[in-house]
Image (cartoon, grey):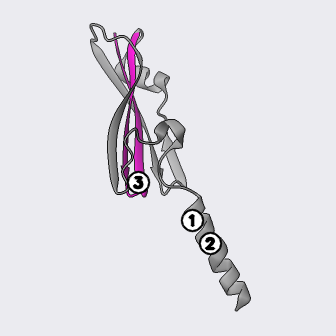
């Protein structure tokens, strides 16, 4: 019985302490919401005569499984961009269960 209780405590603690589906310190929403958050963050650049937009995303489930490539280079490739003018991020998080983190690059 003690082993079952200890196992339950360890499992519960690991789930609670492992964090939410929020993805890293930059990935934490600019405006946190306990149930739902959706925000955009301006990172760098000077807006110009943008002709193309590229987006690359990564996804997290329960903060335990994360997949995707949200790098600037992937966003540039997806948008056919060689000269970057701005880099922004979009973050969406639902109950800490499912989160997306996207890098949005604008340029020509």
- Disc number for residue 11: 2
Q: Position of residue 68 (x, y in %)?
A: 48, 40
Q: Earlier in the sequence, mark 1 or mark 3?
A: 1
Asked if the magenta segment contains residue 50, the reply would be no
Q: Which numbered dot is residue 98?
A: 3
Give the class, few, some or many, for how many residues have Cα within 10 Å of label 2's Cα (few <14, many ≥20): few
Against 79, residue 96 (above or below) is below
Q: Is 86 contained in the magenta span? A: yes
Quadrant location of residue 45? Answer: top left
Q: Which mark is residue 15?
A: 1
Q: Which residues are magenta?
A: 84-108
The residue drawn where x is 64% and y is 76% is 9
Q: Tag 3's secondary structure?
A: strand
**Residue shown at 47% from the left, 39% from the top:** 27
In three-dimensional space, the C-alpha distance between marks 1 and 2, rounded to whole angstroms, equals 6 Å
Cβ atoms under marks 1 and 2 closer than 8 Å: yes
Could you tell me what secondary structure mostly forms the magenta stretch? strand
Asked whether the beta carbons under mark 1 and mark 3 sit within 8 Å of each other, the answer is no
């Amino acid at each position: 019985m003690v082993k079952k209780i200890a196992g339950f405590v360890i499992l519960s603690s690991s789930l609670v302490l492992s964090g939410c589906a929020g993805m890293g310190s930059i990935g934490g929403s600019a405006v946190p919401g306990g149930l739902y958050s959706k925000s955009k963050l301006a990172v760098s650049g000077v807006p110009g005569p943008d002709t193309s937009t590229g987006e690359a995303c990564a996804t997290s489930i329960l903060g335990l499984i994360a997949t995707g490539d949200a790098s600037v280079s992937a966003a540039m490739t997806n948008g056919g961009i060689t000269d970057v003018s701005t880099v922004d991020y979009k973050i969406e998080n639902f109950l800490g269960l499912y989160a997306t983190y996207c890098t949005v690059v604008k340029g020509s």
